[in-house]
Amino acid sequence: MVLSQKQRGSIYSSLAPVIGEEEADALLSQFPTRIGDEPVTRDVLRADLAELRTELKDDMAVLRIELKDEMAALRIELKDEMAALRTEVKGDMSTLSTGLKEDMSTLSTGLKGDMSTLSTGLKGDMSTLGADLRTELHDQMRQMAMWVVGAIIVAMVGGMSLAAGIASALS
């Protein structure tokens, strides 16, 4: 029950001389000064709590349904994104594999061509070198033969001159 200021003043002035000022203040503090400040009864509190529980149950049920729906939508979205990513990665791997195979084939063909050219060049160089060596060896052997023949001729002419000199000295 709410007491007006006039009622509070009248009660205080009547009770203070009988029970004391502090006790009168303590007693009046138990009565609200405005509407809404009155004490809550157990029945009102129980009814308010029951109503609050019902609202919370309803809100929780709605939130649970919304959460389930949102999670299901997220699962579907995640599966779709993973499938798209898997397809993209497979395509990239296939493209990369094809590119690598082509690059390796091109490299292999180039290496085979380079090795064939090198082999042909080496064979030609070896053949030319062999012919050049044979020619040079032949030329040197002929030159040596000519020196030997020349030396023999010189030796023979010298021997003949010596023999002629000896023969003229003996005669």
Image (tube, rainbow, N blue to C red):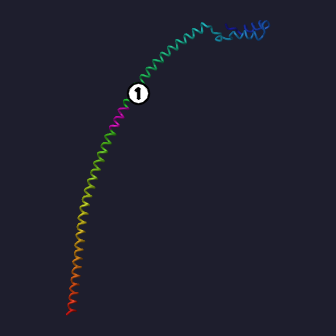
Q: How many marks?
A: 1
Left or right of 49 in this view: 23:
right
Instruction: Work out which quarter of the rendered image holds the C terminus and state it.
Output: bottom left
> Residue 164: x percent and y percent?
20, 88
In the depicted view, which residue is nearer to us: 39 or 46?
46
Eyeballing the image, is 112 above or below 71? below
Camera-nearest residue between 117 and 46: 117
Of all residues shown, which one is farthest toward the right? 17
Quadrant that contains the N terminus = top right
Q: What is the span of residues highlighted in magenta in the rendered image? A: 85-94
Say left or right for 91 vs 23.
left
Which residue was labeled with disc 1?
78
Image quarter of residue 100? top left
Tell me which residue sits at (61%, 7%) in the image: 42
Q: In the rendered structure, which amino acid carries the disc numbered 1? A: Leu
Residue 85's x, y, as percent?
38, 32
Say above or below: 85 vs 128.
above
